[in-house]
Amino acid sequence: MPRNDIFKQIKQLETLKRKAIKQLLSSKEKIEKELSALGHGAGAAIATYKKISRPRDPNKPCKVCGETGHDARRHRFEKKGKKGHASA
Ligand SMILES: [Zn+2]
């Protein structure tokens, strides 16, 4: 077999290998998606984590005073700090 043909075949094999890896990766993604949809796998864990810890929107106004930049929890601390200092 001429050497050029060997190199050609090696190149073809590399292409086939990359194609196979690509296909496997895409089916892996599909399988992982399906698994996470069923509540199983790393994807599911991340999805649950995201659901539990909702990122606080910094532009969302405070429930207590309507100001942005903090949430109602801040006022809970304020009330605690001013306990026994009430003027009403
Ligand atoms: Zn506030």
Image (spheres, rainbow, N blue to C red):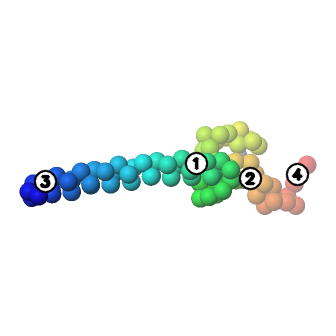
Disc 3 + disc 1, Cβ < 8 Å: no
Whole-Å distance between the Cαs marked 4 and 3? 94 Å
Amino acid at pointer 1: Lys
Q: Position of residue 88 (x, y in %)?
A: 91, 49
- Residue under pointer 1: 33
Instruction: Name the residue: 57% across, 52% down.
Output: 32
Amino acid at pointer 2: Arg
* Marks 3 and 1, the one that precedes in the sequence: 3
Residue nearer the viewer, 81 or 64: 64
Q: Secondary structure at mark 1?
A: helix
| Label 3 C-beta lies within 8 Å of the nearest ligand 1 atom | no
Identify the disc placed on residue 5. 3
Q: Residue furthest front?
A: 1
Whole-Å distance between the Cαs marked 4 and 1? 58 Å
Residue nearer the viewer, 26 or 87: 26
Q: Secondary structure at mark 3?
A: helix
Disc 2 + disc 1, Cβ < 8 Å: no
* Marks 4 and 3, the one that precedes in the sequence: 3
* Mark 2: few/some/many CA within 10 Å (<14, 14-19, 20+): few
Looking at the image, residue 63 sits to the left or right of residue 31; the answer is right
Whole-Å distance between the Cαs marked 3 and 2? 72 Å
Amino acid at pointer 3: Asp
Q: Position of residue 38 (x, y in %)?
A: 68, 50
Instruction: Name the residue: 54% across, 47% down.
Output: 30
Whole-Å distance between the Cαs marked 2 and 4? 22 Å
| Label 4 C-beta lies within 8 Å of the nearest ligand 1 atom | no
- Residue under pointer 2: 73
Identify the disc placed on residue 87. 4
Give the number of the mark in front: 4 or 1: 1
* Mark 1: few/some/many CA within 10 Å (<14, 14-19, 20+): some
Q: Is residue 54 visible?
A: no
